[in-house]
Image (tube, rainbow, N blue to C red):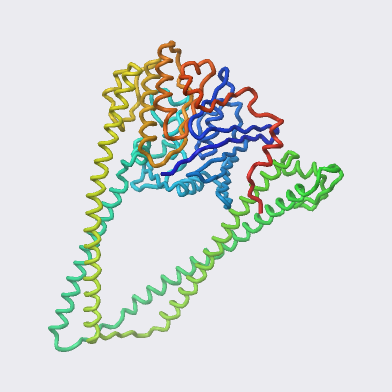
């Protein structure tokens, strides 16, 4: 089992120089405010954003693209820190510090760290590829703004539209019902069957050739090599070398361009590091040499040229961005140089082949008795290879039978749990219309008002409970307030009671957003055991800025 717990969330606005840190309980957390528009939703969204999700509908006043987010988490009781600023992620995992320039690379790290391998299909492809964090996190976050229109688990986080049958496939993966492994085994078996047939045909052809030679009394001379064919081959190699010559020139030019760009970024980093090294004393009197034009600049002019505010956090963030760019360019240069070596090696090989063909006047080949021995050895090798393929397919067939049986057992178990949960919640929330709903049916719910709210809530609670009880991956679960329509006290009592008993007590860490007056619908015993985080405006404070800024992880060479 892999369990992730969020211990704290730090948010820093280095432009306005405000910040705050929010600490959480490893079990259940209530995010509370006296009224709406304080920032409950923004806090929950920020957690999943920092974990790599492309969150929909941040509040316009929540300038998340400018903020620095940092999560202190535990993965199976091992401390880890994740920082995100825009598209750049920095991860401190034990003693290692890694940087990722996009959510794809971060998702590769994240899934590898948790032992996950969530594969999904693109709409126009038959192959499966490793999913992004949008898909990984989508079952665990229920948004107030986009989750209550009857569409289940698809609209809280962007990106799921880029996959085929995404929601169903994702839940099947987490609940051990995915048939991707079974499909892969069947494809492997089919490929091996074709290979076995091809080997059988080759063995038959070789046997015929060997038999024909045995029936002959002497060995015939082979025909002269087709010199016209060699001439055509020569022309093909000449054309290929011309193409390679052009490629070599192009890559050489690209390397020069990248090196110039690398030099400029390194000069900027050098200038920024000099700014960091100077104490705050007499800033205005210190002069700097521009890294590009060598002009003498004051500190203020240097910061203005680099479009930075005069604080340590902004300068460090720019250094990190430049260092990431330097790493990317170095990789491009390295890749281009490696490719250049390959092209030059291929160019030399082609030239050698041209020289060999030009020296050919007449090539003759004779068949002797050694050919029979070599053909017989080849037949034996093919027989051994075919036997191996046949035996491998026997093992694969056994694995397929075991996988099918396991999937059938798991499916029956999940169906029974689903039906039991649906029955209990339908009765509790007085929505008998859901009794006909079957597991894995994610079609949009119809209707509106309180009835739709209750149906959505019931299904969300059912699937979250299934994940909590059956998935080996325990990621934090969050539900923004479900009250999108006016409801009476009786309905509120039923709905909050359902949240308390079917969501907040899950094995996963849980988060739920609620206004303070609605805490009365939860039991006092539950409230006493739950972390209640009370938010007040403004949630980012200037007095927290200096203290929290120094706690940020940074990747500086």
* In this picture, residue 546 sits left or right of residue 199: right
Looking at the picture, how far across and down is residue 369, in whole percent? Answer: 22, 86
Q: Residue, x 25% and y 61% (percent of image)?
A: 392
The quarter of the picture where residue 412 lies is: top left
In the shown orientation, is residue 509 left or right of residue 126?
Answer: right
Find residue 469 and report its image quarter. Answer: top left
Query: Where is the C terminus found, in terms of image quarters?
Result: bottom right
For residue 250, say whether it is visible: no
Question: Which quarter of the figure is the N terminus placed in?
Answer: top left
Residue 318, position in %: x, y?
67, 45
* Image vertical order of residue 474 relative to residue 376, above or below: above
- 504, above or below 206, in the image: above
Q: Nearer the viewer, residue 162 or 258?
A: 162
Nearest the viewer among 402 and 501 is: 501
Q: Tell me: 121 left or right of 334.
A: left
Residue 541 position (above or below residue 265): above
Which percent across, then down, holds residue 407? 27, 43
Q: Residue at 34%, 77% (x, y): give it.
A: 228
């Amino acid at each position: 089992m892999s369990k992730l717990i969020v211990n704290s969330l730090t948010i820093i606005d280095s432009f306005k120089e405000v910040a705050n840190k929010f600490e959480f309980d490893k079990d259940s957390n209530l995010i509370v405010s006296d009224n709406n528009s304080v920032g409950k939703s923004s806090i929950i969204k920020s957690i999943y954003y920092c974990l790599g999700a492309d969150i929909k509908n941040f509040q316009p006043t929540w300038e998340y693209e400018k903020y620095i987010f940092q999560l202190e988490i535990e993965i199976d009781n091992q401390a880890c820190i994740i920082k995100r600023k825009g598209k750049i992620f920095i991860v401190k995992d034990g003693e290692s510090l890694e940087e990722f320039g996009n959510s794809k690379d971060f998702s590769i790290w994240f899934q590898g760290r948790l032992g996950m391998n969530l594969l999904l299909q693109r709409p126009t492809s038959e192959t499966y590829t490793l999913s992004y964090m949008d898909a990984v996190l989508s079952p665990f976050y229920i948004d107030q703004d986009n989750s209550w229109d009857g569409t289940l688990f698809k609209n809280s986080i962007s990106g799921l539209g880029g996959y085929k049958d995404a929601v169903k496939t994702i839940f099947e993966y987490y609940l051990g019902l995915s048939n991707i492994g079974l499909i892969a085994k069947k494809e492997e078996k089919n490929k091996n069957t074709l290979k076995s047939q091809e080997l059988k045909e080759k063995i038959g052809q070789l046997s015929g050739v060997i038999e024909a030679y045995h029936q002959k009394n002497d060995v015939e001379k082979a025909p002269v090599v087709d010199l016209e064919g060699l001439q055509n081959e020569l022309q093909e190699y000449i054309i290929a070398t011309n193409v390679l010559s052009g490629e070599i020139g192009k890559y050489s030019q690209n390397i020069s361009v990248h090196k110039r760009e690398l030099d400029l970024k390194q000069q900027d980093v050098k200038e920024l590091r000099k700014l960091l090294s100077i104490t705050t004393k007499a800033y205005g009197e210190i002069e700097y040499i521009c890294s590009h034009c060598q002009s003498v600049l004051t500190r203020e002019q240097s910061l203005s040229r680099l479009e930075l505010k005069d604080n340590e956090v902004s300068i460090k963030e720019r250094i990190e961005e430049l260092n990431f760019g330097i790493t990317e360019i170095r990789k491009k240069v390295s890749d281009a140089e490696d490719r250049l070596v390959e092209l030059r090696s291929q160019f030399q090989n082609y030239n050698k082949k041209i020289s060999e063909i030009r020296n050919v006047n007449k090539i003759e080949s004779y068949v002797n008795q050694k050919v029979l021995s070599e053909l017989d050895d080849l037949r034996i090798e093919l027989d051994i290879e075919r036997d191996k393929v046949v035996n491998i397919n026997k093992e694969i067939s056994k694995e397929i039978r075991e996988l099918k049986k396991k999937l059938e057992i798991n499916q029956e178990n999940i169906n029974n749990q689903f039906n039991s949960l649906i029955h209990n919640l339908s009765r509790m929330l007085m929505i008998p219309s859901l009794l006909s709903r079957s597991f894995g049916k994610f079609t949009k719910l119809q209707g509106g008002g309180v009835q739709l709210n209750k149906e959505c809530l019931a299904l969300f609670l059912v699937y979250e409970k299934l994940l909590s009880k059956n998935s080996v991956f325990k990621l934090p679960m969050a539900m923004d307030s479900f009250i999108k329509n006016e409801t009476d006290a009786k309905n509120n009592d039923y709905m909050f009671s359902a949240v308390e008993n079917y969501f907040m007590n899950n094995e996963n860490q849980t988060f739920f957003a609620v206004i303070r007056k609605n805490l009365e619908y939860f039991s006092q015993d539950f409230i006493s055991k739950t972390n209640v985080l009370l938010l007040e405006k403004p949630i980012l404070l200037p007095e927290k800025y200096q203290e929290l800024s120094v706690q940020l992880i940074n990747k500086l060479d």
